[in-house]
Image (tube, rainbow, N blue to C red):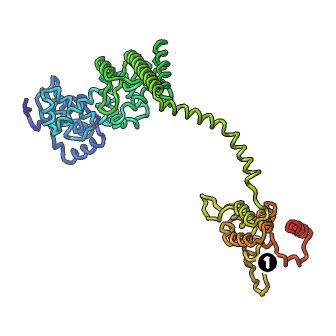
């Protein structure tokens, strides 16, 4: 029906205009701005009203009339509209005048659809796509608290379809979800669109109503089966299924998976207790039906495992019959048995062979220089490769760094400083970096290779590898200074000409006794 104007610019007393309930709350800042504009220029846009029994009722202009009242105006200009179109006019006015939140838009669109306008007509009047108009109408199908959370942007508008899917099948479950989100868990609302099942699990965990139930129609976990208390017969079938499962798969852990079929899902769908989302697995919300479906699934799983076990037993029996009838298989089996018997008897002959090698076959000349060098090289190990991973040559590197480097004069450097008066300062020696004893290793190999007899080779090896000698000659190492002075700890022979104290004399005598 077309909108007609009975009178434009008509002045009406402000107290004769009744203000009905608005679709949205007044914006105080907007009212103050309008009041300032009206005070300077007057009300440029008339109010939209309709005639009533005792005056007029406001259709559009809630902020303008609030601004006029704040200014104390006695009369305001109005435009009178037809009664049949006042709700639609009010909705259009509210939507186009100021940006609304989705909840306010939904109430305005509902007012337009309750009058002669259709969905297409409302979309055309608002300049919206038809899908947007339909989406706003869907929002009004949710509980009032859910609508308020959407208006406050605590629940995204994209989650309306998921909430409607839950509320259509299980209103109590929807109430539990809304209560969970409203209880300081608004951060979980954004997961409704992509993971509605996760939000349902969290809501059920925090739900106070024990009658609220939901479970995935994919498989039943052992924990869920225990909580359902399916009865002694079903529990016995479940235990037998677990034994069959381990019999068929020796690496199996725990009971077999109990899965639902498409027929089970169809049965729940036909009963109207199945929630289906665009993404994710279907969810059943009826506990008694779910209990019966789990019982049937356990029976089906037990029967399947029984069939597999029987087939495996027949296959094994057939394999045994084939082996018994095959001479090659029989000969191979006997040979394997003989090899196992020889393996069990092997430890005794192996020990006898070792004793014979030691006492009769392994006779060497102890005075042979080559034999002595062989044992010395074997005990010292390979050359040092400086690798922190292989540790090759670690033994000879330790002997060279802890013994040769400290005692051989060619491997140390006199770093004594000269005082300003030309005299020498405190005696200081630099023994090189203990982490890179290549020069000491080369000297040690040269010394050992210079042996002329087997006895000399053994003595030279013993000299540098004796643990007691190297540990007693190892001076204390100061931290973080590889070339630190050791003059005060290890004095050369020339320093003995000084008059030592009793403590230093006893220390020198001890060291002399060890090195002699």
Query: Which of the two residues, 438 or 449, is positioned nearer the viewer here?
Result: 449
Work out whether residue 394 or residue 206 is closer to the camera in this orientation and state it: 394
Task: Say whether residue 143 is visible.
Answer: no
From the top left corner, tell me how far across and down residue 491 is, in percent: 82, 73
Secondary structure at numbered mark 1: loop
Q: Residue at x 61, y 60 (%)?
A: 388
Residue at figure coordinates x 71%, y 72% from the top left:
446
Above or below: residue 478 compared with residue 195: below
Q: Residue 464 falls in which quadrant of the image? A: bottom right
Looking at this view, name the residue that lies furthest to the bottom: 422
Residue 386, how many percent across, how many down?
A: 62, 64
Residue 384, quarter of picture? bottom right
Residue 351, given in percent of the width and then of the height, sits at: 71, 43
Of residues 161 and 276, the one nearer the viewer is 276
Q: Is residue 315 visible?
A: yes
| Whole-percent x, y for residue 185 in the image | 42, 34
Name the residue: 17% across, 38% down: 129
* Residue bearing mark 1: 426
Give left or right: position of 216 versus 501.
left
Q: Quadrant of residue 389?
A: bottom right
Using the image as rendered, state which of residue 11 and residue 60 is in the foreground.
60
Total numbered badges shown on the rendered structure:
1
Image position of 80 (left or right of 317): left
Q: 9 above or below 457?
A: above
Quadrant in which the C terminus appears:
bottom right
Residue lying at the far front of the rendered structure: 327
């Amino acid at each position: 029906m077309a909108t007609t104007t009975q009178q434009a610019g008509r002045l009406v007393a402000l107290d004769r205009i009744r203000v009905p309930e608005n679709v949205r709350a007044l914006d105080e800042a907007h009212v103050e701005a309008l009041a300032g504009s009206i005070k300077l220029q007057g009300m440029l846009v008339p109010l939209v009203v309709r005639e009533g029994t005792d005056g007029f009722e406001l259709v559009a202009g809630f902020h303008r009339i609030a601004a006029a009242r704040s200014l104390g105006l006695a009369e305001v200009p109005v435009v009178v509209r037809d009664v049949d179109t006042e709700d639609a006019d009010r909705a259009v006015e509210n939507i186009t005048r100021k940006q609304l939140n989705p909840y306010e838009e939904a109430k305005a669109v509902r007012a337009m659809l309750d009058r002669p306008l259709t969905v297409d007509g409302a979309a055309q009047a608002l300049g919206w796509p038809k899908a947007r108009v339909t989406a706003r109408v869907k929002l009004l199908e949710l509980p009032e608290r859910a609508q308020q959370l959407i208006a406050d942007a605590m629940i995204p508008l994209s989650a309306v379809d998921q909430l409607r899917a839950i509320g259509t099948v299980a209103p109590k479950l929807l109430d539990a979800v809304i209560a969970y989100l409203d209880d300081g868990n608004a951060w979980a609302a954004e997961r409704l669109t992509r993971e509605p099942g996760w939000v349902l699990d969290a809501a059920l965990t925090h739900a106070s109503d024990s009658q609220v139930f939901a479970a995935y129609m994919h498989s039943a976990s052992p924990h869920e089966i225990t909580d359902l208390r399916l009865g002694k017969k079903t529990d016995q079938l479940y235990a037998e299924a677990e034994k069959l499962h381990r019999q068929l798969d020796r690496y199996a852990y725990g009971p077999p998976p109990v899965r639902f079929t498409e027929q089970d899902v169809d049965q729940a769908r036909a009963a109207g207790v199945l929630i289906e989302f665009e993404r994710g697995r279907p969810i059943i919300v009826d506990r008694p039906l779910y209990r019966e479906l789990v019982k049937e699934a356990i029976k089906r799983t037990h029967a399947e495992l029984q069939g597999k076990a029987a087939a495996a037993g027949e296959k094994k029996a057939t394999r045994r019959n084939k082996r018994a009838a095959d001479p090659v298989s029989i000969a191979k089996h006997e040979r394997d048995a003989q090899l196992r018997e020889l393996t069990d008897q092997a430890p005794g002959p192996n020990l006898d062979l070792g004793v014979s090698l030691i006492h009769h076959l392994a006779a060497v000349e102890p005075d042979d220089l080559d034999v002595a060098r062989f044992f010395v090289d074997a005990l010292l190990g390979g050359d040092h490769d400086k690798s922190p991973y292989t540790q090759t040559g670690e033994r000879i590197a330790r002997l060279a760094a802890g013994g040769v480097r400290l005692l051989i004069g060619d491997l140390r450097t006199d770093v004594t400083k000269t005082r300003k008066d030309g005299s020498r300062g405190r005696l200081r020696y630099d023994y090189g970096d203990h982490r890179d004893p290549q020069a000491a290793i080369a000297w040690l190999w040269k010394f050992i290779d210079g042996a002329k007899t087997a006895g000399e080779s053994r003595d030279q090896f013993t000299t540098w590898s004796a643990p007691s000698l190297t540990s007693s000659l190892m001076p204390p190492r100061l931290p973080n200074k590889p070339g630190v002075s050791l003059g005060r700890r290890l004095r050369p022979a020339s320093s003995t000409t000084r008059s030592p104290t009793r403590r230093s004399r006893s220390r020198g005598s001890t060291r002399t006794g060890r090195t002699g």
